[in-house]
Image (cartoon, grey):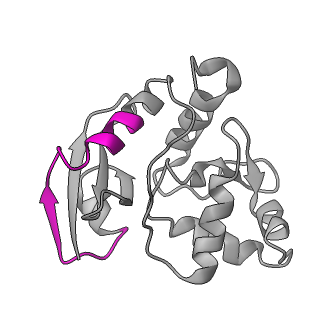
Amino acid sequence: MSLSFDTFPTSFGPFSVAVDRTGAVAAAAFGGLDRLRSRVTADTFVADPGHTREAREQLLAYFAGTRRNFTLRLAPQGTVFQQRVWAALRAIPTGETRTYGELATELGSPRSARAVGRANATNPICVIVPCHRVIGADGSLTGFAFGEDLKRRLLELERPSAVACA
């Protein structure tokens, strides 16, 4: 599989997005191409800002605080369980958080908080699939691949009073 990608500056640092031939987002990460490669399996990555334009524009609007939700098609690679967890992440409203245990309960497996945490950690499409909205049972900002400070900043950006429009 070949993916088109682009890396662009944001107020949160460099961000990269990769899309498949249909334009569906396959991976997204803070950092450059190496970060994308660690999140998704692909034969080749081709720099193609034209093919990633829609994703880049929506992400830039999100980082600017003028977009709350994404309308992008997604194509994450993962197991059936991972796909269920990632769908549950997408259902967490902007400006809200859930604990790993709450997500496990929502998925009908209240004892699977650790498995939910592992699936959350392997999410290949950060921000768009909002793994940063999951927190520890004690309210701590644990488990974000890009660091606690960045997670805090994303959650602050999503506070209802911080977003200018939908």
- Magenta stretch: includes residue 43: yes
Residue sitting at the far front: 22
Please report the residue visible at 62 percent of the width from the left and 36 percent of the height from the top.
155
**Residue placed furthest toward the bottom:** 79
In the image, residue 110 lies at what x, y percent?
A: 86, 74
Residue at 44 percent across and 49 percent down: it is 72
Q: Nearer the viewer, residue 111 or 143?
A: 111
Start-end of magenta stretch:
39-59
**What x and y, as percent, mark residue 49?**
17, 44
Task: Please say if 115 is above or below 161.
Answer: below
Q: Is residue 92 left or right of residue 143?
A: right
Residue 96 picture quarter: top right
* Residue 55 falls in image quadrant: top left
* Percent position of residue 150, x then y: 50, 40
Tally the marks.
0
Q: Is residue 32 toward the left or the right of residue 75 in the image?
A: left
In magenta segment, residue 164: no
Locate residue 126, reporting x and y percent.
47, 54
State the quadrant of the C terminus.
top right
Residue shown at 56% from the left, 38% from the top:
69
Q: Nearer the viewer, residue 47 or 38?
A: 47
Residue 159 to residue 150: above or below: above
Which quadrant does the N terminus fall into? bottom left
Identity of the residue drawn at 45% across and 68% down: 76
